[in-house]
Amino acid sequence: MSTQGFKFVYDPELARFELAPDHPFKPLRFEITRSLLAAVGLLSDADLVSPIPLEDDDILMVHDWRFVEAVKSVTVASKARQDTGLAAYGLGTSDNPLFDDMHDKIARVCAATVTAVDLVASGRALRTANLAGGLHHALRDRASGFCIYNDLAIAIRKAVDHYGLRVAYIDIDAHHGDGVQWLFYDDPAVLTISMHESGRYLFPGTGHTYETGKDAGRGTAVNVPLEPFTEDASFLACFDMVVPRAIEHFAPDLIVLQAGADTHRYDPLADLWLSLEGMGESYRRVVDLADTYAGGRLVVTGGGGYDPYQTVPRAWARLWAEVVGKELPAELPTFWVEDWQRRLGVSMPTVSTEDPAGLTPAPRRAAITSRNRSVAERLLTTLEKIWQRE
Amino acid sequence: MLVSDVMTRKVVAIGPDTPIRDVQTLMEQRNIRHFPILQSRSNTEPDALIGIVSDRDVRLVGADHPRSPAGVTAAHPISQLMVFPVLTAHPDDPIEETAKVLRENKIGAMPVMDDGRLVGIVTGIDMLDALIRMSGVYEAASRLEVEVANRPGALADLLRHVAARNVNVSSVMTTRGDPDTVTFVLRVATVDGHGLARHLRSQGFSVPWPPEPGSDDLPRTGGRGDEVPPATDGTTRKA
């Protein structure tokens, strides 16, 4: 298959900022991944598309204008005086610190995701990626959890309102996709599915099985909270129990995947224990679901991922490889490894995946597997009851 | 939070002569569980609250049940069934006091009276809603439980450490175990709740939740801040 129908949204500015020095969310991950894909020959200039800048009205489809004005007001001056009026909007905390040109930089991330969705919704591409996107915690009037604007919600809103599509959103970040869920909680045209580490242990504390949507959107929110230390087999078993059934029932025109890479066992901010192989398997399943139920139409984004040099580039390179139906080479190009080692002063991975035999088994594996299975079973029972009444 | 913040303002009240049958119908149609009963007085005075009736009282009429009222049928007026005198609340009552009165008297609702006039009704469900709102559970947060000594300044000491990390607090709830300690349930608006818990432990705080690495609740063999498992793919990992 030619990669003609596959587009990678790219602008070097998407990677050229930091929320704060030492902040765990590193936009540079995007550039590291893009350069890896180019180095292994899976990304050519012909695959790249520049984001089309957004109008304010696009952002206001999802966000409160007072919040947007507050974000726009963030300047060097407000940063210096630690403007306390911004705290009400979740801005100026250690999670969401003030940084220069905050609005322009995050609006560009949103533009990239909207461009990715536009290309697929209008039929100009079959599958697209914005690996700089995936800011799933941002709320209508509040920044939250490293996310200022919700690029996913803006793009999905446009797919629904402008193109009249039914959109299934699948979120496999380690954290609950709360922002997207709440923004479409009563919307029957958008199905949100989130698999994540249980809110009992991890931010944002929501994503319980009983959160199933409300009013006209009842039955269109699906949450699979997983135990800490969940490994590949249990994660994929729960995916297979819940996600295909929900997608089949909903019958989407388009699937949007938030592929946060913080589910990996070496991620420092969450406790799920996936391997690169398990993450890759989940990406492949989503591509297959898009082919089976959504005419192939798929948009993928990044998200979390706080092991930015070892894990994230390999996970997201695998994600793009699945999108274009190719495989990563086992050995990563030496010039790519050496270039980043020199620039960052950290060790870079030299191979594309991990030897499963070398991964320590999780403690209490049987108990974790059993508990996850029973959560998925109870969730399915709940959902089938709601769906029967439709 | 006061009663006026949580009460229902549109109250369906009935007169003492209303037949029980009509109250049953009203109950089913409007999904209401408690009816204050008002007696009109002169034109210048507000109606007097003379009783209250619950869905349970009404359902027992004519039922084959040992507690069904003897000799009362659905054709009788509601005054035959109503309970009086009525315990009432004031709009300015703190909700925790209202909750206590409801609980101690084992009742489900109280009419809210202001200057002799019925202005609302407050129920046990309203108390639960208030608890949910006060807990901040709808806000994106990490949840921590921290046990401190029961002494002045203990909460201030704890929050100083939270503030130093520039983390906003969504809510604080207090629970008490033995007299010497207080456990605060904090909901904090940060992704890295584990990092905050680890920091507090390093400062000598007892943090029962989230479970500590290596505990029976949440065993770990490595992870954040601990020894990172060695890479097995030919790379060297930074801890």
Image (cartoon, rainbow, N blue to C red):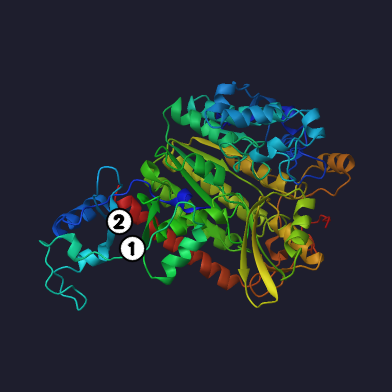
Residue drawn where x is 54% and y is 35% of the image: A153
Callout 2–callout 1 Cβ contact below 8 Å: yes
Q: Position of residue A130 (x, y in %)?
A: 63, 34
Type of the residue with mark 1: Val
What residue is shown with label 1? B86
Of the pair A224 and B238, the residue shown nearer to us: A224
The chain holding disc 2 is: B
> Residue B22 falls in which quadrant of the image?
bottom left
Circle 1 packing at 10 Å, graded few (<14), some (14-19), many (20+), is some
Q: Secondary structure at mark 1?
A: loop
Residue drawn where x is 79% and y is 49% of the image: A350
In this rendering, the answer to whether A93 lies above or below B128 is above
Q: Residue B49 got which mark?
A: 2
Evaluate whether residue A207 shows in this view.
no
Of the pair B40 and A244, the residue shown nearer to us: B40
Q: Quadrant of the N terminus of chain A?
A: top right
Q: Is residue A361 left or right of residue A284?
A: right
Type of the residue with mark 2: Leu
Of the pair A147 and A278, the residue shown nearer to us: A147
